[in-house]
Image (cartoon, rainbow, N blue to C red):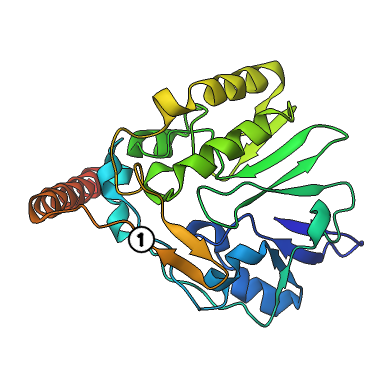
């Protein structure tokens, strides 16, 4: 998220909900070009200063092709240290005076959400999402469906549940998330209430590396990882699936070219 002011629409800062590879994008290049600060929660700094990798994604959580292929997703840190700033205590957001930040960990240790009370706009990042991020078809079609955080990259489910409950209590008018289309009004609030009520029964995966035991974090990054439960048979199945996906993409491109 960029805060923009002035007639030249030059951003005055960049605010990150968290530092996963699909949320930092071109932040290093943009912060260099614009010479603006990049703000994050202090628990995200190890992953944005090159100190620590995130916990490995968990392809054993199930849910669809995106989960199965998640072992290929980047988890290494970037280094934007020259521009990085910690968000101030108290929930204030520099350069966004009507907004507040809320610590909403679970999907990432320093994950934050942004809320503007005057009109109920909530930028939830990946605390929850508005499309089924585990299904390749849903990702392509962007079918609207309120879901929990992407399972394959969520290493602390207890914190994730608490974060959804915290955001539900705001009764927001607008739900903007890191994946999926924006939801509005009573329909959005109803879906968020349902997600909160059913989190432990229907949102949390039945199995997975971080389900029974979360990863632990400190100021320096990852402090503890539960044992890796993947075995060679699972990896072989993933390899076969990946090969099938590549073949299908090649055939699709060939049909389209014809």
Q: Image quadrant of residue 73?
A: bottom left
In the image, is 185 to the left or to the right of 204? right
| 133 horizontally vs 124: left or right | left
Name above or below for residue 231 compared with residue 199: below
Judge whether residue 147 can be spotted in this image: yes
- Residue at image location 79% in from the left, 64% down from the top: 11
User: Residue 40: x, y in percent?
Assistant: 67, 63
Residue sitting nearer the eye, 243 or 115 = 115
Which residue, given by chain and number where applicable, does mark 1 sit on? 225
Q: Give the SS element for disc 1.
A: loop
Label 1: how many Cα within 10 Å (few below 14, some 14–19, many 20+): some
Q: x and y percent of residue 78 in the render? A: 51, 74
In front: 124, or 212? 212
Q: Position of residue 74 (x, y in %)?
A: 38, 64
Which quadrant is home to the N terminus?
bottom right
Rendered image quadrant of residue 196: top right
What residue appears at the point 60 percent right and 39 percent down from the top-left corner? Answer: 163
Q: Position of residue 237 (x, y in %)?
A: 11, 48
Query: Could you tell whether 208 is left or right of 224 in the image?
Result: left
Q: Residue at the location (56% across, 42% down)?
A: 127
Q: Quadrant of residue 30?
A: bottom right
Observer-nearest of 185 and 203: 203
**Farthest residue toward the bottom?**
82
Is residue 21 visible in this depiction of the protein?
no
246 relative to 144 in the view: left or right: left
Q: State which quarter of the image contains the C terminus.
A: top left
């Amino acid at each position: 998220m960029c805060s923009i002011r002035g007639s030249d629409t030059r951003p005055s800062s960049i605010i990150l909900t968290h530092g996963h590879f699909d949320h930092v994008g071109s932040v290093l290049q943009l912060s260099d070009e614009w010479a603006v600060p990049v703000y994050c929660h202090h628990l995200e700094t190890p992953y944005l200063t090159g100190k620590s990798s995130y916990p490995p994604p968990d392809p054993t959580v199930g849910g669809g092709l995106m989960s199965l292929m998640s072992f290929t997703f980047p988890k290494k840190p970037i280094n934007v240290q020259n521009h990085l700033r910690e968000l101030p205590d108290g929930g204030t957001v520099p350069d966004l005076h009507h907004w507040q930040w809320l610590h909403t960990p679970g999907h990432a240790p320093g994950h934050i959400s942004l809320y503007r009370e005057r009109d109920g706009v909530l930028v939830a990042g990946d605390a929850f999402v508005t499309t089924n991020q585990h299904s390749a078809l849903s990702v392509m079609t962007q079918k609207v469906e309120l879901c929990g955080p992407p399972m394959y990259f969520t290493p602390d489910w207890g914190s994730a549940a608490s974060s959804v409950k915290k955001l539900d209590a705001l009764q927001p008018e607008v739900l903007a998330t890191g994946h999926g289309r924006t939801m509005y009004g009573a329909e959005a609030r109803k879906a968020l209430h349902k997600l909160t009520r059913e989190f432990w029964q229907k949102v949390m995966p039945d199995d997975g590396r971080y389900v029974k035991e979360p990863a632990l974090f400190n100021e320096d990054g990852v402090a503890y990882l539960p044992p890796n439960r993947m075995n060679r048979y699972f990896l072989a199945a993933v390899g076969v699936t990946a090969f099938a996906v590549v073949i299908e993409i090649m055939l699709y491109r060939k049909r389209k070219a014809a």
